[in-house]
């Protein structure tokens, strides 16, 4: 990606750099104030650009910026899938899944407030009457499912997993991942919420649950 950016004309590199600065500033403001209370003036101030510059890059204003952050978020999630499963395609699926979950939990934890903001807005838009943003969120979700389905298909073909619809298992992994991360965020402010302290512990627990179920351990397992 870096080599590709260097091959672009200088003006295009500058445009992409400004766009990235705006999105980075917006992520900080959204994480601190929530999407509803955040203003474009605050984003512009944080990015050290004029408000008009934001509209030059994002004519749709705050919602277009939000959707760009969601797309960026899913780009990184798909990269995590590729980096974990495709870098060592012969790695046992259980081991790769545990590594993916650990990396993803850490990725979420580093962006906990932003993650909760995006989750709230995805829920709001998912039940809105505007089909455009709703379709956009569904497309992003589909991208993550597509990426995770590929290594699951390989694992089924190698008989590491019993025959099953790979996309369904990908969906279950992502749903449980999101739910566990939400719970982890709640645990920070709720002492009654029992939750593993490290991303490694959580990844190990979820890998076992997803691949072995919650029943008693089998002999020799």
Image (cartoon, helix red, strand yellow):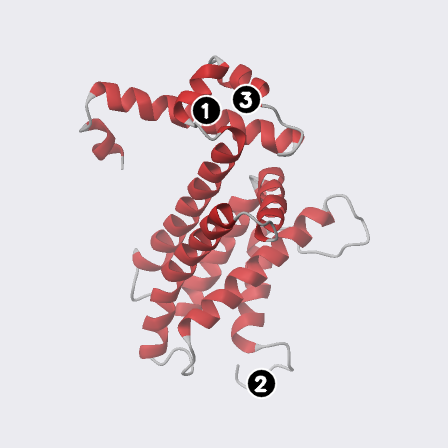
> Which residue appears at 58% of the width and 62% of the height?
176
- Kindly report which numbered mark, 1 or 2, lies closer to the viewer in this rendering: 1
Front one among 167 and 124: 124
Q: What element carries label 1?
A: helix
The residue located at (67%, 47%) in the rendering is: 185
Q: Do the residues labelled 1 and 2 touch (CB within 8 Å)?
A: no
The residue identified by callout 1 is 22
Assess whether mark 3 and mark 1 are in contact (beta carbons under 8 angstroms). Answer: yes
State the image coordinates of residue 130 (x, y, percent, origin top left). 54, 47
Please give the residue where the numbered disc 2 appears in the rendered image: 218
Asked if residue 92 can be seen in this view, the reply is: no
Q: Residue at x 30, y 55 (%)?
A: 87
Per the image, the residue denoted by label 3 is: 43
Q: Disc 1 to disc 2, how far (Cα)?
A: 53 Å
Residue 86 visible in the picture:
yes
Q: Which residue is drawn at 56% across and 28% down?
A: 28
Give me the C-alpha separation between circle 2 and circle 3: 54 Å
* Kind of element beneath mark 3: helix
Q: Where is residue 177 in the image (x, y as percent from the top left)?
A: 56, 58
Q: Which of marks 2 and 3 is nearer the N terminus?
A: 3
Near mark 2 (Cα within 10 A), the count class, few <14, some 14-19 or many ≥20, is few
Q: Which of marks 1 and 3 is nearer the N terminus?
A: 1
Nearest the eye: 200 or 69: 69
Above or below 124: residue 111: above
- The answer to whether 184 appears left or right of 82 in the picture is right
């Amino acid at each position: 990606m870096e080599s590709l950016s260097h091959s672009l004309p200088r003006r295009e590199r500058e445009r992409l750099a400004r766009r990235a600065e705006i999105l980075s500033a917006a992520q900080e403001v959204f994480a601190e104030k929530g999407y509803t209370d955040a203003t474009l003036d605050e984003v512009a101030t944080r990015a050290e650009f004029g408000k008009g510059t934001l509209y030059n890059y994002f004519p749709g204003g705050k919602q277009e910026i939000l959707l760009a952050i969601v797309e960026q978020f899913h780009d990184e999630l798909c990269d995590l899938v590729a980096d974990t499963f495709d870098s060592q395609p012969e790695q046992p699926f259980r081991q790769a899944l545990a590594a993916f979950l650990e990396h993803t939990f850490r990725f979420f934890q580093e962006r906990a407030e932003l993650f909760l903001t995006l989750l709230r807005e995805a829920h709001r838009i998912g039940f809105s009457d505007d089909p455009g943003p709703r379709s956009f969120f569904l497309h992003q979700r589909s991208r993550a499912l597509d990426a995770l389905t590929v290594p699951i298909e390989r694992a089924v073909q190698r008989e590491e997993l019993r025959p099953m619809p790979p996309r369904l298992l990908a969906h279950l992994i992502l749903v449980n991942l999101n739910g566990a991360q939400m719970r982890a965020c709640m645990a920070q402010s709720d002492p009654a919420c029992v939750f593993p302290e490290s991303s490694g512990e959580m990844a190990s627990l979820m890998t076992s649950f997803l691949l072995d179920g919650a029943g008693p351990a089998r002999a020799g397992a």
